[in-house]
Amino acid sequence: MRCDLHVHTCRSDGAHTPAEVMRRALEGGIELLSLTDHDTVDAYDELESVATPILLHGVEITTATDDGEELHMLGYFPFGFSSGIRAFLTEVQEERRERMRVALERLGERGIHLSFEALQASCEGPVISRSHLAQAMVDKGLVDSYGGAFRRYIGSRHDIVPRPSIRPEQAIDMIRRERGISVWAHPRLSRLQRELGRLVSAGLNGIEVYHRSRKDHELAPTEALADAHRLLRTGGSDWHGHHPGDQLGQYTIPSQSIRPLLSFFDLPEPEATR
Ligand code: AMP
Ligand code: MN
Ligand code: MN
Ligand code: MN
């Protein structure tokens, strides 16, 4: 089976609606898919009358370590989304709005005046991200380009937009409480070597070993680290759909490489064993 367990929709910072993502996933030959929007699972509520590949329930939670480094934690939920996880995400979304209010004030002090309403208008879901902020700045003519908004104002760290308060360990904890599987999203090898032990102690279940941005020479050592800690392997494209040449289905992983993870899910036969 061709699998992609890391895909975004416009309910967070992807370009396309959940239904459109499903159409493209089927067109691209994906057989097993997870929508893993940042801090929201709203996309799943829109798929009732939509043809889809086999779906695994997923989400990507934005956290920050004590050192202020961003760390993304994927959650996969064999039993679906509980009211507990939905309530948790609602709080995270509210914190994102608060962080953006602070950012808008800071931008105002630098002569960039953007209203919260204008920023909100650039979102098609409950999640406001730095990419929406950059886009809103472009739309209002405050900067020349999206990249320029980051270079001149937003930065790639959390200079303007305060970092999230949630720690990786809290996300791991919450995912476990809600009967999910926690997976460290797209970690670089050097960071795994430094921080993996701590997160394993906190209850981490897996590593996103296969990812489009994974460097070839990091693959074998990353697989070895996952095995050494008896962690599950997952993988996906992290597709957002903003670039026309980048089509869903161009990067997939075979189900054989993630079989231990799939054993937690009640998948339709016989595809699951293909
Ligand atoms: P957030 O969810 O608020 O942390 O926003 C993260 C998103 O902002 C990422 O998924 C990127 O799309 C975008 N982003 C972050 N840093 C940069 C950067 N230096 N240049 C362009 N886009 C960026
Ligand atoms: Mn994103
Ligand atoms: Mn991520
Ligand atoms: Mn992602």
Image: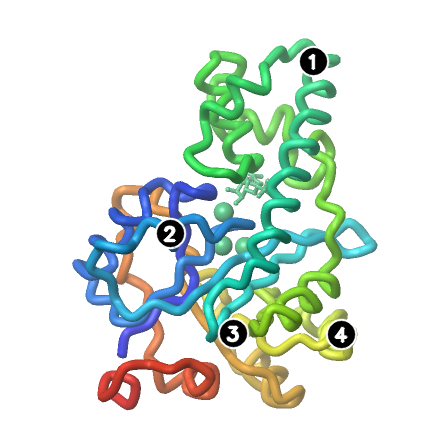
Where's the N terminus, which quadrant?
Answer: bottom left
Q: Which residue is mark 2?
A: 45
Marked residue nearer the N-terminal end (1 or 4): 1
The circle drawn on residue 108 is 1
| Res. 105 image quadrant | top right
Give the spatial CA distance, label 4 vs label 3.
19 Å
For the point 42% across and 82% down, which residue is it?
262
In the shown orientation, is residue 250 left or right of residue 150? left
Marked residue nearer the N-terminal end (2 or 4): 2
- Residue type at mark 4: give it: Ala
Give the spatial CA distance, label 1 vs label 4.
40 Å
For the point 61% across and 78% down, which residue is it?
205
Vertically, is 162 above or below 196?
above
Q: Which residue is mark 3?
A: 209
Q: Which residue is mark 4?
A: 202
Vertically, is 236 above or below 255?
above
Vertically, is 221 above or below 139?
below
Judging from the image, what secondary structure is the residue with disc 2 in? helix
